[in-house]
Every structure is written in C-alpha cells, then in structure tokens.
C-alpha cells in the first residue's frame, strides 16, 4: 500500500450533544452508570425531605435576639442563647470591663498568624516579632505592669484560654520535641533509651490521664507551701504530650535525610551541634512542616479536654451557660456555635497545610 | 625519638589521647551526667511526694484494691454491686472500655471504608458529600462531638412513658434504646456450636476450592457458598431445635422498661461520637491507600481481560491495604484512647471508674499509674502488631 | 486453552483478512477533538508503527482498541467482534489483544511467575501448572527465565519491560499493542526490548507499535503512520515514508527526530 492520505476539508465536527456542556457534565458525573443513577436519585430525595425542615428549624422559626423564656415558647432554633451570653462564652470569668484586653490579645495573635502565613515573611525578624508579640499578649492577659490592673490566671477563660493553651503549648513543645527526636536518633544508649521510653510512654496514654496527673499528682511533686496554678499545670501537661508527638514527626524528617548530608558536614569539620543546627535540622524540619501543622490542629482540638479538669476553656464556658435554667435545653444551638468556631479555625489551618505542602513540593 | 605529628611515636604506638578529647569517653561522661540529673530530679520529686502523702494521710500501695468500693456502676457486663471490691470495679471499667472500643472499631472500619470509597466515587454528589463529611468531622474536637450527641439524646428524646416506637418491640427514650431479643433457650448454645462448625467448614472449603482451581483451573463460588453455610447451619439447628420464637420483650414498668436489652444513652452517645469522628480519619486513610495504587495497575489488569471484581481483589486491594493498614491501626488505637473521654458524659469506662476510685481513696498516684499501664498495654500490643504486619507485607525491592 | 468463537459474518463491510478495523472513528475529550476520522485496517500478521508529536492522539488511538478509552463515533471491530458498551464484547476483545505499557505496570506485590500466570488462571481458567509452564516458556523467549521467582522491584527497567511483554504473550493474544514501550528505559536497555519485539515480529505476530524508534520501524514495519492533531496525516511503507515524505508536517516531524 503506497497511498498517502488526501487532506480532508477542514470541517469541524461537533462532539455528540450528550457529552458536553451542562448535560454532558450531569451525565458524566451523576448518571454515569445504573448504580450511580440510583444513588443520585436517592440522595436528592433525601435532601428534599430533610433540608426544608432543617431550614425551617434553623432559620425561619428561629429566634436570634430574644430572652430565654421566649425561646422556650417558640419551637424553632434558639440562637439567642449566643448573643445573650457571648461575653461569658468567649471570655469566661475575665472582669467585664477589662475584656478589651483579651480581645486585643486575640486580635494580635490572629494578626501574627496571618502574617506568618506568607513564606516570604519567614525571616529572623519574624521570630523576634513573635517573641515580642507573645510577651505583649501575656502582659495584656496578666496585667500588673504599665498601669494594667492585674487579673489572676484563675479568671482567664473562654477563647483566649483555648488559644493560649494551644499556642504556648506548641511553641514550647516544638523545641522540646526536636530535642527528643534528636535524642532518639542518638547513638548514646542512655540518652536513646530515656527518649524512647518517654516518647512511647506519652504516646501510649490518653491525654486525659496526663491532665488528671497535672491536676492531682503535680501538686504532690512540689514541696510544702509551693503551689502552681491550675492553668500552668495543665499547660505543662499539654506541652509534654504534644512534644512526644512532635518528636515522632521530626524523627520522620530526620530519617528521611540522606547519610551523605551527615558525611559532608563531618568532612567540613562541623561538630554535632553545628551539623544539626546548620545542615540537618533546617532541611528535616522543612520536610515535615505539613505533619507539624497537622499536629498543631490536633493540639488545638485537644485543649477542649481541659473541660474535664474544670478549666474554663471555650467548651466549659458554654456548658456553664447551658446549666443556667433560663437557657437549659438549647445545647444543640450552643454546641453548633462552638463547633463552627473550632471548624473555621481548624479548616483554615488544614487548608494552609495543604497549600504549604503543594508549595514545598514544587519548590524543592 | 622524633615527634611525628600523625599521632604516633616513631615506634608506631598511638599517643595517649587526652581523656576529655576522646569521643567515646566524652559520650560516656555526657550520659552519666544526664542520668545523674535525672536521678537527682527523680529523687527530689519522690521525696516531696512521700512527704506530701504522709502529711495528707494518704495511704500508699495497692492494698485498697481489696476494700469494698461502695459505689455503683451504671452499666456492667458482669455482675457487680457496691459491696464488691475496688479491684472488681476496675475490672468492670476495663471490660466496658473493651466493649465500646471493640464495637467502635468494627463500626468505624465499616463506615470509614464506605466513606473513603465514596470519596473516590465517579458520582459527583456522592464524592462531594463524603468530602464534606470528612472535613466537618475531622475539624471538630471529639469531646465536643460527644457532648453534642449526648445532648441530642437527652434533650430530644422523650421520657420512657412517651417513648418513641419506630418498630414494634423497639423503644427509644432518654433512658436509652430498648429492644426485644430472643428469650434465653438451650437452642442458642447449639446454634453457637453450629456457627463455629460452619466457620471450620468454610475454612476447609476454601482450601479444597483453591486446590481444585490449581489443578483444573475451574473456579468455585467460595464466597457465596461460605455465606450460605455460615447463615444456613445455625438456621437449620434452630429449626431442628423446635424453632423457638419466644422473645424477651421490654415492658413499661413504672418509670422504665423491664426486659429486653437496654443500650444506655451514655453508651450510645459515646459510640456514636467516637465512630463518626474516627471514621473521618479512616476514610482519609482508605482514600489515600486506594489512590496510592497507580492507574496503570488497573489498566494492565483490565487489558488482560480480568473482570473488575477480580482486578480489585487480586491487584488493587493487596497493594492498597499495605498503605491503609498502618494508619488504620493508629486510628483504632486512637479510638481506644479517646474512649477515655467517657468520663465526661458519664459512661463508666476504665478511666471513669479509676477516677471515682481516686476520689474515694485519695490514692491518685496508684490510680493514674493503673490508667497509664492499661492504655500502655493496648498501645504496645498495637505497635507490635503493626511492626509485624509491616515486615510481613513489605514489597521486595533491590 | 482458548475457545474459538465464530466471527460474526453479518457485517458486509468487514474484509475477511483484517483483524482490526477502525471505521470513521472520532473521539473527543470534552470539546477537544482528540481523534478525528480515523480509518485503519490492520491485516493478520501485519506490523504498523505509529509516530507523531506528543498530543497527536497516537496513544489514545491504540488505547481505544482495547477499550481503555471509549470512542464516541465510528466503529472499531477486532477479530470480527465489534467494540461497544457490551461488557461481554469488551472482555472477549481484551483477551485477544495484548498491551504493553510505557510504564511496564508489573504488579509489584507478586513475583514474576505470579505476574505472568495471573491472567491465564483468572481470566482463562487455566490450571496452575499449565499456566506456569506457559509462563516459563515465554520467560525463556524473552531471555530471563532465571528471574522467575524475583519481584519486579528487583529487576532493571529493561528486564521489567521484557517481563511485561511475556505477560501479555501468556494470554495468547492475536494482536499486540505497544504504547511507547522503550520511552521510559535507560538507553542501554532499549536494545534488549527491541530485540524481543523483533523476534516477535519474525514469528508473525500482528503488532501496532506507537514509538519513536525509527530503526525499528525501518526494519520491521509494513506500514508507518504519522499522526498529528488527531488525524492520520500520512501512511506509507517505511521506505517511502522515510525517503519520500509527502506532507509538510511529516517532513517537519522527521527533520526534528532524525538528527
């Protein structure tokens, strides 16, 4: 066969109508097989049954700014429980007139976090900014200097307490975790054993046992007369807990480092600390940023456990409101509100982690 | 003698290295130093603790285990009353933890797998809904979820006198879910035996079917026949024993139901909260596992003419399971640890019972140590299993 | 081992000698017209090489033949069976058509023998011993019988691709499709795979090969097709194709790859 194909006239033929456009999308995504067609119909039916009654409960019959009594009369959702109690839910027992201080502290925190998002800002000046920022936030909460009235830590509560426990928890846990990870990789048997025992012990027990320990056992460790306030004890427990998990995350990064890096550093004449500080850790820590952010999200969620040792974080303040007879019975609405707060924070953090992962993937 | 600067003398004996420059000696000194600090710290803490315990007249040791507990436990699988010892109370706690963890793990694996597969569905609605589920349930603290479900149970459900009856014999109220079960009958023992016998039979059947396929090439519908045997044998036994149909029906007596099986709202809320939360993480692990198998594998298998069921069983699942099992085991462990949150909604799991014990005896050290030991046992067993599994299924590479 | 079914004789257009017929075939990815009016008849024992720039649709074309991609218009007939949505037809065709992928796609969790016997045992219901004998036979043909118990991860790229070819041969296909079989190989391993393909050709296998290996095309192909933008632009014997390209695009392409 020695023919050459003759050029056809360039008439464009359109694809079949059922495979493009909206119809094409619907066919390809919702009805692309018998099973899927049935599923789509069942799901749409389910929505049609449930969604209208939910919308009626949540938005149409609901009250947004009423009193408790009015809420009990009406049948819809009682969202008014939130506006009526918002100051207590958010700030706990912090003195009413001084609540601008925790508010300011939270705004600063959110601002710093937002600024730190952009990788271009990751310079030494950022670390200083954080340091100063954390100091100012602590000052705003505690008072006692610069004319700010002192506020006992037993009065700290609500959202600032949650944020405080998570942020300080992770900031302190991170270096501690890195140390434990390095210790676990060490060739010195005593150090390695101590680190392994610590990490496996802490990771093997639920956080609540450590919180119980902080609440009941830590006071026993101290000599007579010295007490540490409850929040600090819980903070220490959270730090110790998170550090063990960070240690495992960092260990993953360290194990991913090729032997050649260690060898190159040795041949230049760097000692152990220099090697770790200048060569290994910068690379290893960068690799494990995504699982580290994931750990921050977990730490944030775990602060809610301090409810059980009666610390007034966001969850506990809400529960106190619910035990008020005026507002009893509206747990669903209140819990949905806090769930939204947690969800928004965690969702942003996990989105950020995903974005970061993508950026680092293409960059390396 | 000449000083040769390579560290040896002219006789080629290595110079004695100054004590503190020898890395081996340095390392030993460092370790000794760290151990010394730890020992001193430990001594300090223990001394303080002993002093404090004495001052507060708190006993030490495990003697309290033999004492009478004098508190009731809401639900228990084994018989227990306030006159029993603390040891028995703690045992009840452990059993409760195991029950909720065991059932929770089974339900979570099923639900998580379904959602994980749904996440990858070609149906846009299904995959979007799965994605929303995963995002929502992962990002809300598990304790909040437990409180939420518990609140739903006792705020939305009526009292037993006005219990909901969705199906005859099933009653839903704020005291729990009650339903009828077959009344105790000797036939049940025989049915259990028949079930076990059926399992053995299925095992032998599989071996025989595999041998037959290897020698003749003809496949045998092992799955369908196995299901038939496992359901059929107990059913036949039941029929032979006279087909007993007497039921233990719950009846409203006073303020609550008597008879039947009662699942408390605490247990239900705990189970529901734990399962829904952990399933979101399992779904992600399942999804990642399935996606880890490259599309080319499916294409190669299909190009050979294998049906999609076989492609799944022989090519995709073995590879996907390798990636799924480690995080799955972690989630199972996480569920077991999270079951300790039962103390917050009043289900008497081990932590809850131990907490009450601590309150009554004041012996916090022993109580918390016991809590940790029990959970450590779970964790270490799970780690050991995972290590074994990883070794066994590692892909052989250069 | 194989059940011979009677080819359907009610299609007057199919010529008796053609084992693959593609008639006015079109395919779109959304709005993108990836295959535009493809007409191709492949006779038994014929060897076709398809070349062209990336994105021209050549891989999509052969993937349509074993239904890894679906065509939207036109007909594809393989060994008398028409390729439609009917699952039975698809399975029948896939058993007759072997495919070798650019990325080999060996099953990493099975050893070599298990890779080769998977299809015969489960799709053709062959007893295990017979399947293993066939597998060893083809392993010897591709010159690596000693690797039988190793795992794919332990083999080099060239070895893996030869195993992949043997794996397809174990199903006794009538046609072999090759989708850029040597493109993912290190240069020193390309020859060993091409040698296997050439010995296959000498034994009379019908082959459609998408490849840039022009030496292979020159020595073994009956026809060379050049595709661009979804169309078959030129089709000729190797001699004519390389010495007398008719179209500007063909000339341009050849000048780019034959330097």
Image (cartoon, rainbow, N blue to C red):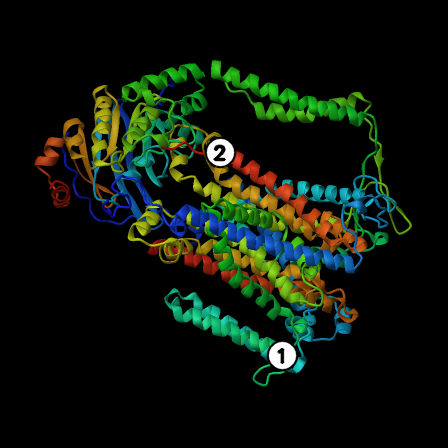
Circle 1 SS class: loop
Viewer-closest of C153 and A170: A170
Q: Do callouts 2 and 1 mark residues in contact (Cβ within 8 Å)?
A: no
Would you place residue B222 above or below residue A91 in this image?
above
- Residue at 17% x, 27% y: name it: C220
**Quadrant showing the C terminus of chain A:** bottom left
Identify the chain of the residue marked 1, using the numbered disc in the image: A
In the rendered image, residue C135, in percent from the top left (x then y), is placed at 36, 19
Q: Quadrant of residue C115?
A: top left
Q: Which residue is mark 1?
A: A99
| Residue B135 in view in this figure | no
Residue at 78% across, 60% down: B55
Direction front: furthest residue: B1
What residue do we see at 68% from left, 50% from top? B340
Q: Residues within 10 Å of mark 2 (few under 14, many from 20)?
A: few
**Alpha carbon distance from label 2 to label 1:** 57 Å
Q: Residue at x 56, y 44 (%)?
A: B330
- x and y percentages locating residue C219 in the rendered image: 15, 27
Q: Secondary structure at mark 2?
A: helix
Query: Is B198 in front, or is B357?
Result: B357
Q: Depth check: C19 or C169 in front?
A: C169
Q: Does residue C176 appear left or right of residue B309 in this picture?
A: left
Q: Position of residue C31 (x, y in %)?
A: 33, 51
Residue C35 found in image quarter: top left
Label 1: few (<14), some or many (≥20) within 10 Å? some
- Choose mark 2 or mark 1, whichever is in front: 2
- Relative to C208, B359 lies left or right: right
- Which residue does the numbered mark 2 point to in the structure image? B391
Position of the N terminus of chain A, as image quadrant, is: top left
């Amino acid at each position: 066969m020695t023919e050459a194909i003759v050029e056809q006239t360039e008439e464009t033929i359109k694809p079949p109508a059922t495979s493009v456009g909206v119809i094409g999308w619907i066919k390809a995504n919702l009805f692309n097989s018998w099973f899927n067609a049935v599923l789509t119909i069942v799901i749409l039916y389910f929505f049609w049954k449930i969604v209208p009654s939910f919308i009626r409960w949540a938005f149409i019959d609901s009250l947004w700014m009423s009193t408790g009594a009015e809420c009990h009369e009406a049948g819809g959702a009682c969202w008014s429980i939130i506006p009526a109690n918002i100051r207590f839910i958010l700030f706990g027992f912090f003195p009413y007139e001084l609540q601008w201080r925790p508010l300011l502290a939270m705004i600063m925190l959110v601002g710093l976090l937002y600024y730190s998002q952009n990788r271009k800002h990751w310079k030494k000046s950022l670390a200083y900014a954080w340091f100063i920022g954390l100091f100012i936030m602590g000052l705003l909460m505690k008072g006692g200097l610069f004319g700010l009235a002192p506020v006992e830590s037993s009065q700290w509560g609500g959202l600032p307490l949650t944020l405080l426990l998570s942020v300080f928890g992770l900031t302190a846990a991170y270096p501690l975790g890195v140390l434990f990870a390095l210790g676990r990789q060490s060739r010195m048997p005593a150090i390695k054993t101590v680190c392994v025992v610590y990490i496996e012990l802490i990771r093997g027990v639920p956080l609540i046992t450590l919180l119980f320990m902080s609440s009941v056992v830590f006071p026993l460790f101290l000599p007579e007369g010295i007490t540490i306030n409850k929040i600090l004890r819980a903070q220490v427990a959270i730090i110790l807990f998170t550090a063990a998990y960070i240690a495992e995350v960092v260990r993953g990064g360290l194990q991913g480092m090729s032997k050649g890096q260690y060898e190159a550093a040795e041949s230049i004449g760097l000692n152990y600390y220099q090697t770790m500080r200048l060569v290994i850790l910068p690379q290893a820590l960068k690799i494990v940023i995504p699982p580290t952010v994931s750990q921050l999200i977990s730490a944030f969620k775990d602060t809610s456990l301090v409810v059980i040792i009666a610390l007034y974080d966001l969850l506990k303040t809400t529960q106190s409101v619910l035990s008020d007879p005026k507002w009893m019975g509206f747990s669903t609405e209140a819990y949905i509100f806090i769930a939204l707060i947690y969800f928004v924070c965690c969702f942003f953090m996990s989105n950020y982690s995903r974005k970061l992962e993508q950026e680092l993937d293409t960059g390396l | 003698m000449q000083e040769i600067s390579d560290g040896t003398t002219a006789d080629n004996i290595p110079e004695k290295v100054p004590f503190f420059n020898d890395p081996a000696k340095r390392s030993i000194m460092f370790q000794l130093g760290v151990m010394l600090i730890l020992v001193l710290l430990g001594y300090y803490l223990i001394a303080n603790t002993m002093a404090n315990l004495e001052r507060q007249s708190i006993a030490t040791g495990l003697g309290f285990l033999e004492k009478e507990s004098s508190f009731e436990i809401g639900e228990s699988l084994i018989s227990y009353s306030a006159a029993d010892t603390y040891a028995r109370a703690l045992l009840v706690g452990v059993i409760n933890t195991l029950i909720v963890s065991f059932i929770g793990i089974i339900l979570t694996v099923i639900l998580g797998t379904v959602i994980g597969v749904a996440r990858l569905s070609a149906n846009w609605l299904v995959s979007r809904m799965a994605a929303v589920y995963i995002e929502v349930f992962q990002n809300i603290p598990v304790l909040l979820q437990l409180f939420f479900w518990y609140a739903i149970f006792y705020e939305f459900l009526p009292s037993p006198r006005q219990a909901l009856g969705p199906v005859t014999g099933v009653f839903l109220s704020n005291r729990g879910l009650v339903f009828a079960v077959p009344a105790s009958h000797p036939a049940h023992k025989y049915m259990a035996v028949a079930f076990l016998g059926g399992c053995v039979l299925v095992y032998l059947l599989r071996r025989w079917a595999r041998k037959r396929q290897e020698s003749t090439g003809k496949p045998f519908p092992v799955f369908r026949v196995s299901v038939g045997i496992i359901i059929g044998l107990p059913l036949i036994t039941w029929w032979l024993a006279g087909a007993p149909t007497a039921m233990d029906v719950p009846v409203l007596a006073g303020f609550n139901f008597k008879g039947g099986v009662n699942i408390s709202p605490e247990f239900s809320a705990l189970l529901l909260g734990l399962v829904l939360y952990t399933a979101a993480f399992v779904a992600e692990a399942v999804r990642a596992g399935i996606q880890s198998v490259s599309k080319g594998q499916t294409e190669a298998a299909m190009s050979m003419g294998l049906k999609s069921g076989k492609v799944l069983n022989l090519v995709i699942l073995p590879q996907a399971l390798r990636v799924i099992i480690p995080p799955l085991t972690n989630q199972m462990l996480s569920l077991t640890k999270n079951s300790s949150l039962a103390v917050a909604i009043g289900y008497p799991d081990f932590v809850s019972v131990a907490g009450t014990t601590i309150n009554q005896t004041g012996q916090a050290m022993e109580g918390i140590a016991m809590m940790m030991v029990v959970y450590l046992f779970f964790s270490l067993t799970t780690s050991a299993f995972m290590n074994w599994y990883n070794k066994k299924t590692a892909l052989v590479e250069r | 081992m194989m059940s011979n079914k009677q080819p359907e004789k009610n299609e007057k257009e199919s010529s008796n000698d053609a084992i693959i017929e593609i008639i006015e075939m079109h395919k779109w990815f959304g709005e993108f017209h990836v295959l535009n009016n493809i007409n191709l008849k492949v006779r038994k024992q014929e060897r076709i090489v398809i070349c062209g720039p990336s994105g021209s649709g050549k891989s999509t074309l052969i993937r349509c033949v074993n239904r890894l991609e679906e065509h939207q218009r036109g007909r594809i007939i393989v060994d008398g069976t028409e390729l439609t949505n009917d699952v039975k037809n698809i399975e029948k065709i896939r058993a007759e058509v072997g495919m070798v992928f650019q990325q080999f796609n060996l099953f990493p969790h099975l050893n070599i023998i298990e890779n080769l016997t998977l299809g015969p045992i489960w799709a053709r219901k062959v007893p295990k011993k017979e399947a293993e004998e066939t597998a060893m036979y083809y392993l010897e043909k591709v010159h690596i019988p000693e690797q039988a118990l190793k795992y794919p991860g332990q083999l080099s790229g060239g070895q893996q691709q030869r195993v992949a070819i043997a794996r397809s041969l174990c199903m006794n296909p009538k046609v072999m499709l090759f989708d850029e079989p040597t493109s993912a190989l290190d240069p020193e391993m390309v020859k060993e795979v091409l040698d296997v393909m050439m010995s296959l050709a000498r034994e009379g296998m019908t082959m459609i090969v998408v490849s840039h290996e022009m030496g292979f095309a020159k020595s073994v192909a009956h026809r060379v097709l050049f595709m661009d933008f979804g169309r078959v632009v030129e089709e000729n014997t190797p001699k004519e194709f390389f010495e007398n390209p008719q179209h500007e695009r063909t000339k341009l392409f050849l000048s780019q790859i034959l330097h």
